[in-house]
Image (cartoon, helix red, strand yellow):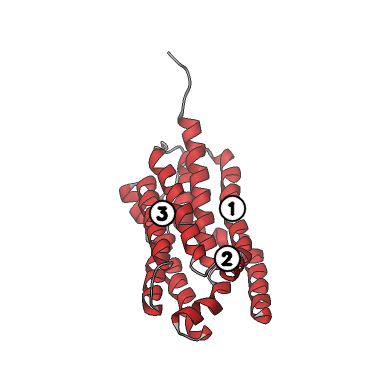
Amino acid sequence: ASDFDPAPVLTVAHSLGSAAGAFAVNLDMRAIVPLLPSLSADLGVNVATAGLVATAYMLPYGAFQLVYGPLADRFGRLPVARCTLLAFAVGTTLCGVVGSFETLVVMRFLTGAVAAASFPMGLAYVGDAFEYRDRPGAISVLLTTSAVSQLLSLSLGGILAGFVSWRAIFFLDGVMALLIATLLFWVRGAEKVGGGDGFGSCVAVFLTRVDVFAAVDALGSASERATVVDT
């Protein structure tokens, strides 16, 4: 009989899947800014009004993060991560095919609500699957992928909007999220080796993100101002 234990491999696979999911969500969140001029022209609204699609995403994204902790405690980290990421893949893809501005706003709201689960579930899984001494490395992967996606999103969104279509970023993100969700459906859940609960992990998201992403948000804001000036 083989002595190979697949558990560590599956734990790493799920951790990478969670990090990739956070990457897709953060890309979707920030890439909307350079899309606004072409989006507004295509859907027949002014740029100021088009900004509602960003607000419609961010409000539920912030509000629903605390909701997923209790849901994960009840149904499990992995089932919640799988279902929300799959719903995110469907939602962001539909954002690319809508024909009216009002429908886009509604779809962005729904997509933001399910996207809110990505980072909290990744952080909660790290608490479950890794011993305390191993958690900093796992958390750093999660944070780094999120930060990189925020930094890349503005330039990628602008390139796709300029050379393809403002809808292209949603299709790209939808395919990416679907592939990641498929990976998570293949991976089994980890046995809990760490303490803590889902709600506590979701509260920790805010404490962690405020410190780590302050510099990233500053860079993103500077890039957004540069984009507006160039426009």
| Residue for point 54% across, 61% down | 27
* Image quarter of the N terminus: top left
Q: Earlier in the sequence, mark 2 or mark 3?
A: 3
Q: Amino acid at mark 3?
A: Leu
Q: Where 46 sits versus 126, above or below?
A: below
Q: Earlier in the sequence, mark 1 or mark 2?
A: 1
- The 10 Å Cα crowd at callout 1, few under 14, some 14 to 19, many 20 or more, is many
Frontmost residue, 134 versus 112:
112
The answer to the question of whether label 2 and label 3 lie on touching residues, with beta carbons closer than 8 A, is: no
Left/right of residue 117 with respect to residue 150 in the rendered view: left
| Residue that mark 2 sits on | 160
| Residue for point 49% across, 58% down | 173
Q: Nearer the viewer, mark 2 or mark 3?
A: 2
Q: CA distance from mark 1 to mark 2?
A: 21 Å
**Picture coordinates of residue 222, whole percent (x, y):** 68, 73
Q: Earlier in the sequence, mark 3 or mark 1?
A: 3
Q: Secondary structure at mark 1?
A: helix
Frontmost residue, 132 versus 178:
178
Res 146 visible: yes
Q: Residue furthest front?
A: 163
* Image quarter of the C terminus: bottom right
Quadrant position of residue 60: bottom left
- The 10 Å Cα crowd at callout 3, few under 14, some 14 to 19, many 20 or more, is many
Q: Residue furthest left?
A: 74
Q: CA distance from mark 3 to mark 1?
A: 16 Å
Res 64 visible: no
Q: Amino acid at mark 1?
A: Thr
Q: Secondary structure at mark 2?
A: helix
| Residue that mark 1 sits on | 145
The answer to the question of whether label 1 and label 2 lie on touching residues, with beta carbons closer than 8 A, is: no
**Picture coordinates of residue 97, whole percent (x, y):** 40, 67
| Residue that mark 3 sits on | 85
